[in-house]
Each structure stands twice: as structure tokens, then as C-alpha cells.
Image (spheres, rainbow, N blue to C red):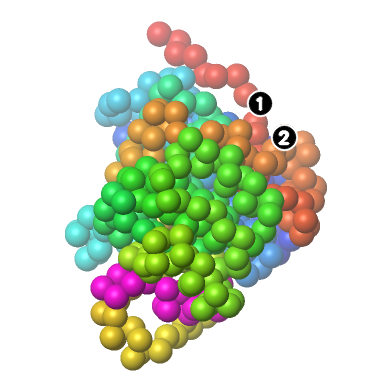
Amino acid sequence: MQAFVLSAPERLAAVDLAAPAAPGPGQVMVRVARVGVCGTDIHSYHGRQPFFAYPRRLGHELSGWVESVGADVVGLAVGDVVAVEPYLQCRQCGACRLGRYNCCENLQVLGVHIDGGMCERICLPAAKVHRADGLTVDQAVLVETLAVGAHSVGRAQLAPGEAVLVAGGGPIGLAVALLALAVGARVALLEPDASRRAVATRVLAGLAVPGSWLGSQAPPAATEAAAAAVRERFDGEAPTCVFDATGRRAAMEASFALPAAAGRLVLVGFQADRVSFANPEFHRRELAVLSSRNSTAADFGTVLALMRAGLVDAAAWITHRATPDAFPPSLAEWLVPGSGLFKGVLAWDAAVPRSRS
Ligand SMILES: [Zn+2]
Ligand SMILES: [Zn+2]
């Protein structure tokens, strides 16, 4: 079978691999249909991903169809459209015992710590394969990205009508904004890039909660001006919850100044460097700072329900698409600044597996 392996930074190539053996007990074989490319893959591609070893088969945003099921698998049948939850946890560490297995101490993410799903077929534990009945494989490949947003909104425990600022309108920021709107929050999304704002406008159309707003300010800089513009939108009040989805250190540090007193700040974006803040202002406002990492099966369920309700327009999200034959050169073109890449997907044009029974 065809697969794509990153052998060294900026060296992605198609390789021919043996197809996996039949799924074992409790496992499912997935015929991969779509693989999304995200910031993590791009960092790995450029050699900037911590804890990443080469060679590595990429691919953690995966959709496809069930090709075959092992013994003891219930609830999945050959031909089902599925979304893959790419986080494999130990189920024994303290975080796992608390049910917080998205931050398992021994977490293995497909395509990062272990070989991923950029291949035609992959066997996975059935619990990681979510039925996406009623959805297309283009929608199902977006579930993981949106689930990261769902997880952060769950961490924040948003209330309907609450004033929320999302800094950064890339795929994760847009996922946070969409999920926050879905729980009835008023959302201001700040994104300086016009092509990203155009995607956000399409994606969020139909979800508008009165008082929500898409701003063109860069999230970090001009903190006072940006903060004043946001307060103006929220009837003179500072947002009670701020999400950073930029992953940029300056923006993350500036975001400590933005929440109202007794508010919270949720850092969704990843930054390998130190992030610091001024204690007096933080202390005076008794802020809560939360990190949000990956997502859980429950977050997948939240997103699948939103998709079934028709709230996720995959055509608006997916800006770039490549067939396997064109994939490595296409990816290199997508990564050139100015390409307008928002979400790119590798698309296998496979026939839907049919049950033999
Ligand atoms: Zn991703
Ligand atoms: Zn664990």
C-alpha cells in the first residue's frame, strides 16, 4: 500500500508498505480517505516539532471507512464512515485514572510519537474509531481539529451570553470560536490575515450570536488598542474568557492583560518557549489560567453532533486538496507564504468498502 513518510526535515516521500494484517481482537481496519495537514505536521515538516523523531509516517487528522472489524468489536460495521481519534493513552497514569487521558503522561499521538495514518489502511483500537454516520469523509476529517476547540470550550465552562475573545483565527482559533458560538457565547475573533478572516466569515455564517464580531487586529500587539476595541464591542466590558489560539509568545503574554477581573485565560496554542506575565495585574484580577491539550472521546461526540446538525461547512474549511500522486510537491507549494492555506487535505479516491455479508 501507498504511504507517506517524513525521512528528515522537508523530505516527505511516498513509500510502498505492506498492508496491515487483519485487525486483532478489539481492533478495526480503516481504509483511509482523507488526511488533514495541520500546524503540528508543518512544524514536523520543517524540523521544529519537539519530541519528534525521523523517519515518521505523518497523519493524525484522519477519516475513512471501516474496511474490516476484529473479534469483540461492537457498534462498527464494514463501510461505516469514521473519524479517528489519534491519541493513544496508557490508561494507568494519574491523568488517565482521572479520565483526563488527553494529557496522559505516556501519550502517543499518531503521526507524532508513533507512525500515523498517511497510508491507505491502518489498524486501530475500536474505541479510537468514531462512527460518523450521516457525514461525508470531508466533514469527518475535520472532527479532530474541531474537537480541540470543543475541549478548550469545555475547559472554560462557558455560559450562554458570556463575552469571549478568541485571539488567532487559524484552524484551532476558528474551531474555538465555532464551539463557543455553539454554546451561545458572544465571540470576538481577532485575526490579522485577510484570507483567514474570509474563511472565518464563511465558516461562522449562520452561527452568529448577537454581539459577535470578527476583528482585523493582530492579537498580540497594541494591547491597549486591541483591548479597547474588544471592550467597545462588549458594551464597554472586558471579555470574561479569553482564548489564545496563536501559539505565539508575544500574543500569549499580551493575553494576560485582556480578561475581566475574575475571568479566565485558556491557552490552546502551543509554544515551546517560556511564557511570562506580570503578577500584580494577574493577582489583582484573580485570573484563572488554563491550558487545553488535544481532546477526548466526549469532545469528538460534541463535534459529531454539531456536524449532524449541519453547523460545519467542510467546503468552507478545506482550502487545498491533493491526490496521493501530487501530494509531496503540493504540500511544499501549500507551505509557501501567500498560498492561502487554511486546511489542506490528502485525498485518496478509494471505493467505499462493502460488507461481504
Ligand atoms: Zn492537528
Ligand atoms: Zn496515561
Q: Is residue 285 magenta?
A: no
The answer to whether any part of residue 261 appears in the image is: yes
What residue sits 64% from the left and 52% below the top? 196
Relative horizontal placement of residue 346, taking residue 185 as reference (left or right): right
Q: Residues within 10 Å of mark 1 (few under 14, many from 20)?
A: few
Question: Does 77 appear above or below 17?
Answer: above
Q: Amino acid at mark 1?
A: Asp
**Quadrant position of the C terminus in the picture:** top left
Residue tagged 2: 323
Q: Nearer the viewer, residue 212 or 355?
A: 212
Tell me whether circle 1 and circle 2 mark residues in contact (CB < 8 Å). Answer: yes
SS at badge 2: loop
The response on whether ligand 1 sits within 8 Å of label 1 is: no
Q: Quadrant of residue 207?
A: top left
Pointer 1: what residue?
Answer: 349
Magenta stretch, residue numbers: 247-265
Name the residue at 42% across, 73% down: 258
Front position in the image: 323 or 182 = 182
Left or right placement of residue 58 versus residue 25 in this view: right
Q: Position of residue 185 (x, y in %)?
A: 35, 51
Q: In the rendered image, which quarter is residue 69 located in? A: top left
Crowding at mark 2 (Cα within 10 Å: few <14, some 14-19, many 20+): some
Q: CA distance from mark 1 to mark 2?
A: 8 Å
